[in-house]
Each structure stands twice: as C-alpha cells, then as structure tokens.
Image: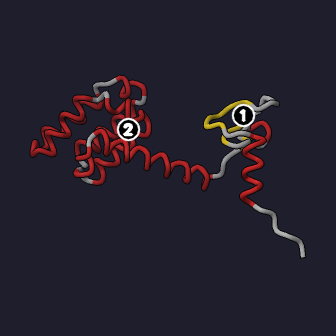
Amino acid sequence: MSETFDRAKLFAELEDEERFVPHAYRDSRGLWTIGIGRLIDKSRGGRITRDEALYLLGHDVDEKERGLDALEPRWRELDGDRQLVLLGMAFQLGIDGLRGFRDLWTSIREYLDGGGQAALDRAAAAMLDSLWATQTEARAKRLAARMRTG
C-alpha cells in the first residue's frame, strides 16, 4: 500500500517555491498569474472556474458589508433592496468611493430618521449627480430607481 502525500506539506513547499502574490502579475515566462502560482493567462489556458469566482465574490461581499457597517451601521435598517443598492455601489466603487457620496448618506440618514419618500428621492438624485453616474449610466439609473422605490 502506498503512503498518501502530506497535503499541508505540499502547500507549504509550493508557497515557498512560488511565493504568494496578492495581485495579478507576470511570472518568469511573462504569463499572467495570481496567488500562489495560479496561471490565469488565457493564452495558455489559464482561468478560474465559476465556482472559484463565486467563492471570491462571497469574500468580496463580506468585506463590503463590514466596510458599510463601519461607514454607517444603520444601513442595515434599510429594506433589502436598498441594502443591495449600497452593496452594489460598494462593490463597484469600493467603500472609500462610496464614502464620497456625502449627500447620499445625508439623505439615507434623514430617511432612517423618518424623512420619508422625499429623503429617498434626494438619495437617488445624489447618486445620479456624480461622475460614477456618467461613467456607468445604465447601472447608476437602475440602482437610483431601486433606491427611490425599494
């Protein structure tokens, strides 16, 4: 009977040889790689699977939730659709980018304090009155409409 290899030892050896790089880079042959020697260069059949992409997306969304919690803990008091709007914006713009939407946050706080539909209308208008809305117009219009109507 053959002995089973030590998976943890293999991982340690491969990380030692390949090194961990937290971003896409070109390896010694000029091929796009990421992580610990993961080939992603399409020209050589590199890729990630849909399951891997969804795994990464889950981590990204968790990170954005934590960022929103730090930025404005009351965001979770909004209904689910409006939470999705903020998460979608955070995913696209990053938390720092979303932090810059001061009028949006002011309007959301007003709404949460009982400001009613007028506050949501102002929040949607603040979303559309931005560079982001000119860069991804259709997406911004969709998300602003959801902010307005839930």
* Residue 63 spot, x, y in % from top left: 43, 45
Comparing labels 1 and 2, the label whose residue is closer to the camera: 1
Q: Earlier in the sequence, mark 1 or mark 2?
A: 1
Q: Is residue 35 left or right of residue 149?
A: right
Q: Secondary structure at mark 1?
A: strand
Residue displayed at 65% across by 34% down: 24
Q: Which residue is mark 2?
A: 89
* Residue that sits furthest to the bottom in the current view: 1
* Residue 73 spot, x, y in % from top left: 26, 46
Tell which of 70 and 9 is nearer to you: 9
Q: Secondary structure at mark 2?
A: helix
Tell which of 3 and 57 is nearer to you: 3
Tell which of 135 and 32 is nearer to you: 32
* Residue 37 spot, x, y in % from top left: 73, 42
* Residue 3 spot, x, y in % from top left: 85, 70
Q: CA distance from mark 1 to mark 2?
A: 28 Å
Q: Residues within 10 Å of mark 2 (few under 14, many from 20)?
A: many
- Quadrant (top left/top right/bottom left/bottom right) for the N terminus: bottom right
Q: Is residue 110 left or right of residue 123?
A: left
Q: Which residue is mark 1?
A: 32
Residue displayed at 22% across by 51% down: 77
Residue displayed at 38% across by 35% down: 95
* Residue 39 quadrant: top right
Q: Amino acid at mark 1?
A: Trp
* Residue 113 quadrant: top left
Q: How many marks?
A: 2
Q: Amino acid at mark 2?
A: Met
Residue displayed at 42% across by 30% down: 136
Q: Is residue 20 left or right of residue 127?
A: right
